[in-house]
Image (cartoon, helix red, strand yellow):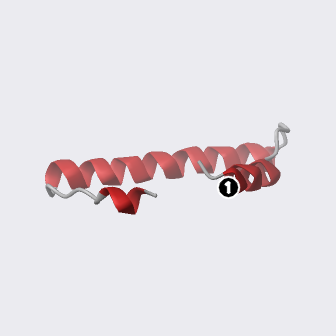
């Protein structure tokens, strides 16, 4: 994973337990789950798959 992206996320969400940080972390988890769900549906129901170079 790109270190700059991880650093950006840690700066944004932080490691604190304030409400904003918790909300950002929750949103990130939901967005990742949504992307995985959409990819799964495309592969199963539409018989589509992204080429490996698009995954980077």
**Is the residue 22 above or below the residue 51 in the image?**
above
Q: Residue at x 69, y 49 (%)?
A: 6
- Image coords of residue 5 (percent x, y): 67, 55
Nearest the camera: 19 or 42?
Answer: 42
Q: Residue at x 25, y 51 (%)?
A: 41
Q: Is residue 5 left or right of residue 47?
A: right
- The crowding category of the residue bearing disc 1, from other C-alpha atoms within 10 Å (few below 14, some 14 to 19, many at least 20), is few
Q: Secondary structure at mark 1?
A: helix
Q: Is residue 5 left or right of residue 54?
A: right
Nearest the camera: 4 or 20?
Answer: 4
Nearest the camera: 30 or 50?
Answer: 50
- Image coords of residue 21 (percent x, y): 78, 47
Nearest the camera: 40 or 24?
Answer: 40
Q: Residue at x 33, y 54 (%)?
A: 38
Numbered label tally: 1
Q: Residue furthest bottom?
A: 54
**Is the residue 40 above or below the residue 50 in the image?**
above
- Image coords of residue 30 (percent x, y): 53, 47
Q: Residue at x 85, y 38 (%)?
A: 16
Q: Is residue 20 left or right of residue 53?
A: right
- Image coords of residue 8 (percent x, y): 75, 56
User: What residue does disc 1 label?
Assistant: 5
């Amino acid at each position: 994973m790109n270190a700059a992206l991880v650093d950006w996320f840690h700066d944004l969400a932080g490691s604190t337990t304030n409400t904003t940080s918790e909300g950002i972390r929750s949103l990130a988890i939901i967005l990742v789950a949504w992307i995985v769900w959409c990819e799964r549906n495309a592969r199963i129901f539409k018989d589509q798959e992204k080429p490996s170079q698009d995954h980077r």
